[in-house]
Image: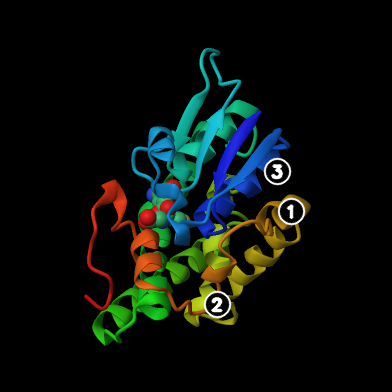
């Protein structure tokens, strides 16, 4: 049994989708980040970085005590290797799968994340930051589109690299980026969207409904959501 410590964001959905794809028995433990449920000492023991998602595998690969694991990219690799699926066996395809997974973890996710921050959460307009991250978000989507013009899936075959990117592309609408400008990414998006496991894992509605749209957060919610409360430090809210 795998416990999934979950929040309904692209990073959380990568893991809920993969668990459904792999048909691994799991239990979802939802967190409300607005209430700071991820900032407790109990959760810090699971993930010292106090961020979601995380898993605990009660029957870990190699045996022994339950394994706690954080960082969505590391979780995807661990689960795919455990099941022996959705990570290519061929060494060159595997290398490309990891390349695109790292691209998501270091580029697409963080840059789209910052674009979401400055478009949707920032309480005072900062045009420079908004444009800088929206430009980068669009540029990365173009990179994805170019790759998908030459290959059906990022690593040639459907893999954890696609699963890592897909929820971020779904979320792009919220930062006013339309997929119609990226026909290859759109074709790929729809193909993955039609998969039953993606529907099930990607539509899990268990937490943080209030993160949709352009949320208006109280100073305490803001502090909980953006990590400033971590380690109990009281910190500045957007209004100071
Ligand atoms: N690199 C991490 C990022 C995790 C992350 O930033 N998670 C967000 C939710 S998607 C979070 O926990 N935010 C709460 C906070 O910053 O305090 C991963 O891929 O797992």
Ligand 1 within 8 Å, label 1 CB: no
Is residue 221 shown above or below 2? below
In percent of width and height, residue 191 lies at 71, 61
Q: Looking at the picture, how far across and down is residue 131, in whole percent?
A: 31, 82
Quadrant occupied by the C terminus: bottom left
Total marks drawn?
3
2 or 3: tag closer to the N-terminus: 3
Ligand 1 within 8 angstroms of badge 3 C-beta: no
Give SS at disc 1: helix
Q: For the residue carrying disc 1, how many other residues have a C-alpha within 10 Å: few (<14), some (14-19), or many (20+)?
A: some
Q: Which residue is under mark 2?
A: 173
Label 2 crowd (10 A; few <14 / some 14-19 / many >=20): few
Find disc 3 in the rendering and name its residue: 21
Distance from Cα at disc 1 to Cα at disc 2: 20 Å
Q: Which residue is at a point 49% across and 25% down the rendered structure image?
A: 67
Residue at the image point whose x is 52% and y is 56% from the top: 32
Disc 2, ligand 1: is the CB inside 8 Å? no
| Residue identifier under label 1 | 200
| 124, 133: nearer the viewer | 124
């Amino acid at each position: 049994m795998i416990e999934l410590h979950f929040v309904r964001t692209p990073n959380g959905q990568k893991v809920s989708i993969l668990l459904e794809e792999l048909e691994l028995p799991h239990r979802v433990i939802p967190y409300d980040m607005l209430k700071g449920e991820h900032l407790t000492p109990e959760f810090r023991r699971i993930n010292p970085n106090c961020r979601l998602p995380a898993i605990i595998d009660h029957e870990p690969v190699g045996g022994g005590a339950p394994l706690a694991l954080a960082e969505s990219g590391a979780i995807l690799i661990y689960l795919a290797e455990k099941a022996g699926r959705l990570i290519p066996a061929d060494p060159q395809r595997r290398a490309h799968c990891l390349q695109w997974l790292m691209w998501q973890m270091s580029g697409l996710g963080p840059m789209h994340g910052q674009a979401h921050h400055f478009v949707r959460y920032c309480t005072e307009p900062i045009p420079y930051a908004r444009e800088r991250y929206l430009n980068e978000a669009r540029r990365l989507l173009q990179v994805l589109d170019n790759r998908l013009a030459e290959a059906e899936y990022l690593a040639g075959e459907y893999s954890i690299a696609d699963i890592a990117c897909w929820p971020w592309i779904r979320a792009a609408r919220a930062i006013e980026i339309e997929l119609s400008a990226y026909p290859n990414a759109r074709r790929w998006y729809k193909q993955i969207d039609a998969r039953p496991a993606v529907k099930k894992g990607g539509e899990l509605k268990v937490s943080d409904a209030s993160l949709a749209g352009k949320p208006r957060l109280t100073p305490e919610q803001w502090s909980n959501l953006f990590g400033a409360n971590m380690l109990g430090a009281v910190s500045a809210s957007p209004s100071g």
